[in-house]
Amino acid sequence: MSKPRLAITLGDPRGIGPEIVAAAIADSRVRARADLVVVGPSGTVVPASEEIGEWSSGGSAEHGGRLAGLSIERAVKLALAGSVQGIVTAPIDKHALFAGGYDFPGHTEMLAALTGSHVAMMLASERLRVVLVTTHIALRDVARELTRERIIEVAGITRRGLQQLYAIAEPHIALCALNPHMGDGGRFGSEDDMLLAPAARAANILGPFPADTVFVRAMRGSFDAVLAPYHDVGMTAIKVASFGSAVNVTLGLPFPRTSPDHGTALDIAGQNRADPASMIEAILECARFTGTTIPAKI
């Protein structure tokens, strides 16, 4: 059986992306499971450590963000053309991406725009899967963006993703509550009763359930995934449960895309201290996904 060909971007060149990519490429498990094409802003290179090292640089945030954005664009073009079967992305600096001319809050939103897809951001590990209903927005904006339509849409994307990528025929999906203790009968807010509960019924998912128990229940096997109403409640749960081994998966794209569960770590870049474990798992997970059938549009 032939190995899948995956595009791998180096992320912001000022961060740890180049070094964790180099370490992952040298890993025997990665070499056995996938052929990698390293994608830079001006093209692709054979994945060798000395070549990857040339991508590392200091420079300004604007320069780093521009290089990262160009690399993402090129990787998507390769995937849409069928030249690669999936994409693995190293971390980017969101402020730098914007400074470099790309007005996206992160990878997820940029990939959605480049492919014309409706997507959802999932963090997955062996212990837990968390899908974000709202992603990179200010907490004060969650009440505006957390709509019945968005909950139903993300539930549908999650169901199809679990069926297609994980072969779960009938996924059990739970919705995490927005307010403490699910609002405690309206004392701490009425959104869970008036918005989340009806949306969950319409989407044929379970909940809402209080945030302080739903993730524990999922880790014990009650649910295949939990929909988190806003970024930090979901990200905190998955990182406490599985930091370093979780993988970011974009659901709803016409090809598999994964990334590590951490950021650019600018403070330790270039010191060979970065742990490549999550990058390695992201590559292996993307390789596993390439054996599935994914519709061109969802």
Image: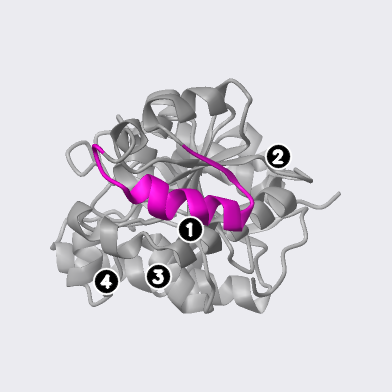
Q: Circle 4 sits on which residue? A: 66
Q: Is residue 196 highlighted in magenta? A: yes
Q: Is residue 199 left or right of residue 158?
A: left
| Location of residue 291 in the rendering, given as x and y in whole percent from the top left corner | 77, 53
Foreground mark, 3 or 1? 1
Q: Amino acid at mark 2?
A: Ala
| Location of residue 97 in the rendering, given as x and y in whole percent from the top left corner | 25, 66
Q: Secondary structure at mark 4?
A: helix
Q: CA distance from mark 2 to mark 4?
A: 33 Å
Which residue sits at x=49%, y=30%? 245
Q: CA distance from mark 1 to mark 4?
A: 33 Å
Q: Circle 2 sits on which residue? A: 32
Please state, as top left, top right, bottom left or bottom right, where the C terminus lies in the image.
Answer: bottom right
The answer to whether the residues at label 3 and label 4 have Cβ atoms under 8 Å apart is: no
The residue segment tinted magenta is 187-208
Q: Amino acid at mark 3?
A: Met
